[in-house]
């Protein structure tokens, strides 16, 4: 038995420290899972970042916060998770052993960051750690959800299939982000053009018109004077507004890092029309995909529910799911416990009920995943369309006001010259 010192987070995200005894690192991770704790650090005998532990971190290019940097100075972060797991999945899918695949990746990958990451993970594996334990040491690259799924794959001996499903899931999420960015590219371009037109008018064209009309003894039209006053006000006090907005955002983000702040904000965001339902459906989609994958690969229901719970990012939904898991552990049906959360529509509950009645809920969960996947696509299209129309309308209003101000000034100048 070895003594492990750990730093972990509970279901509310609060950091916990302590010790436990286990036969291996994998056993220690399982004990933490039973305690509903997500490990952040797990060391044999010490949690200090100095001394011997600090030496191997320096050898692997890791700083005090566990961030990796390759030999050429490039930072290794979340962006490398998908390409790394995709390469690993391709090699293990061809029949190569996991350790051999990672060692080969450390030599053959073209990206220096991925090579360095593979060598770092291989260093942990050669010390006797499991793959999930090695990935846990690189939490700046691999998230909790990915590590939990890989841990489940190791426990069931079905790592290759879980890697493939995990890569598909990450690619789908990347595709969703790509769709949103693509849909917003044109509106953002229009906004920049509109802002450029406004700035050109306020700082170049308008002063000349103003000086010309003043020299002729004429006053600017009311609409033009209002724009001048607004521009002068923003020049004088705009920095304070920007500073207040930045300070407010920083304050909110800092508060969200606290236990109470995150709990309150996660609850409030679900009440925002449109955005709340989108985030709720996204969490349920992730939940159904993960749970079906774990159950399909031989993980027991309660253990699968506990592991799935750690992949839910919103604390309000996580708490409701935790209550549902407790009811299931007491003998309640999965469909009944999920219905009590209030997050699942009737048709989804019916699908799960049919699955339970047939003795295999996995096909039902997959059907739920497809249902919410289609729903997410529709929500993304509606959301991006609404954003596009809204941004374009605002831009057109600003440009229209500028055009009206210019036309008013030109007519005023024309009439003044005619009278003179």
Image (tube, rainbow, N blue to C red):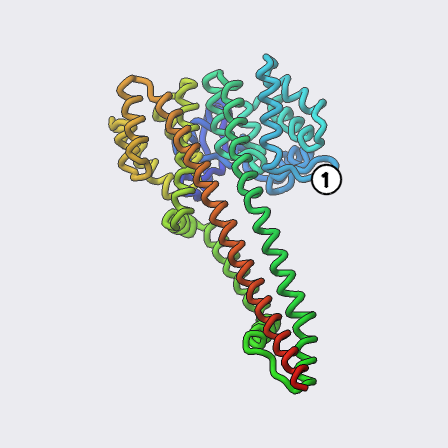
Q: Quadrant of the C terminus?
A: bottom right
* Percent coordinates x, y for residue 10 in the rendering: 42, 39
Q: Tell me the SS state at disc 1.
A: loop
Identify the image quadrant of residue 297: top left
Of residues 173 and 100, the one drawn nearer to the viewer in this rendering: 173
Q: Residue at x 44, y 34 (%)?
A: 311
Q: Against 369, is 314 above or below?
A: below
Identify the image quadrant of residue 278: top left
Q: Against 230, is 253 above or below?
A: above
Q: Residue at x 45, y 35 (%)?
A: 38
Q: Residue at x 69, y 85 (%)?
A: 215
Q: How many marks?
A: 1
Q: Against 246, is 81 above or below?
A: above
Horizontal side of 154 relative to 196 (left or right) equals left
Q: Which residue is mark 1?
A: 73
* Percent coordinates x, y for residue 107 in the rendering: 71, 23
Q: Against 67, is 4 above or below?
A: above
Horizontal side of 368 relative to 89 (left or right) equals left
Identify the image quadrant of residue 232: bottom right
Of residues 303 and 58, the one drawn nearer to the viewer in this rendering: 303
Name, please, the residue furthest toward the right.
Answer: 72
* Percent coordinates x, y for residue 159 in the rendering: 51, 19
Q: Residue at x 52, y 57 (%)?
A: 250
* Percent coordinates x, y for residue 378 in the rendering: 44, 38
């Amino acid at each position: 038995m070895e003594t492990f010192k750990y730093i972990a987070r509970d279901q509310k995200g609060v950091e916990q420290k302590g010790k436990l005894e286990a036969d291996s690192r994998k056993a220690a991770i399982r004990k933490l899972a039973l305690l509903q704790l997500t490990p952040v650090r797990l060391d044999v005998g010490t949690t200090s970042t100095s001394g011997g532990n600090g030496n191997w971190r320096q050898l692997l290019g890791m700083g005090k916060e566990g961030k990796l940097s390759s030999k050429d100075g490039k930072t290794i972060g979340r962006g490398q998770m998908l390409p790394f797991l995709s390469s690993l999945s391709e090699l293990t899918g061809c029949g190569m052993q996991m350790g051999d695949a990672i060692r080969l990746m450390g030599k053959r990958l073209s990206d220096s960051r991925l090579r360095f990451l593979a060598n770092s993970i291989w260093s942990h594996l050669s010390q006797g750690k499991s793959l999930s334990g090695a990935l846990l040491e690189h939490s700046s690259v691999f998230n909790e959800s990915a590590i939990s799924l890989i841990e489940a794959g190791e426990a069931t001996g079905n790592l290759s299939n879980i890697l493939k499903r995990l890569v598909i899931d990450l690619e789908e999420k990347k595709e969703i982000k790509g769709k949103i960015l693509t849909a917003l590219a044109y509106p953002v371009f229009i906004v920049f053009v509109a802002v450029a037109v406004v700035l050109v008018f306020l700082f170049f064209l308008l002063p000349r018109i103003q000086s010309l009309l003043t020299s002729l003894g004429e006053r600017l039209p009311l609409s033009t004077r209002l724009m001048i006053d607004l521009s002068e006000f923003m020049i004088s006090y705009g920095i304070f507004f920007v500073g207040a907005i930045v300070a407010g955002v920083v304050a909110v983000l800092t508060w969200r890092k606290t236990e109470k702040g995150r709990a309150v904000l996660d609850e409030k965001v679900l009440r925002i029309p449109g955005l709340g339902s989108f985030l709720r459906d996204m969490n349920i989609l992730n939940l159904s995909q993960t749970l079906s994958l774990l159950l399909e690969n031989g993980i027991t229901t309660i253990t699968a529910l506990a592991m799935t719970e750690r992949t839910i990012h919103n604390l309000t939904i996580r708490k409701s799911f935790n209550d549902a898991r407790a009811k299931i552990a007491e003998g309640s049906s999965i469909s009944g416990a999920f219905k009590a959360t209030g997050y699942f529509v009737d048709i989804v509950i019916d699908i799960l009920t049919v699955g339970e009645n047939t003795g295999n809920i996995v096909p039902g969960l997959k059907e739920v995943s497809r249902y919410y996947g289609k729903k997410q696509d529709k929500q993304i299209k509606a959301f991006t369309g609404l954003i596009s129309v809204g941004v374009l309308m605002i831009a057109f209003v600003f440009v229209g006001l500028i055009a009206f101000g210019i036309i008013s000034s030109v007519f005023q100048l024309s009439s003044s010259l005619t009278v003179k």
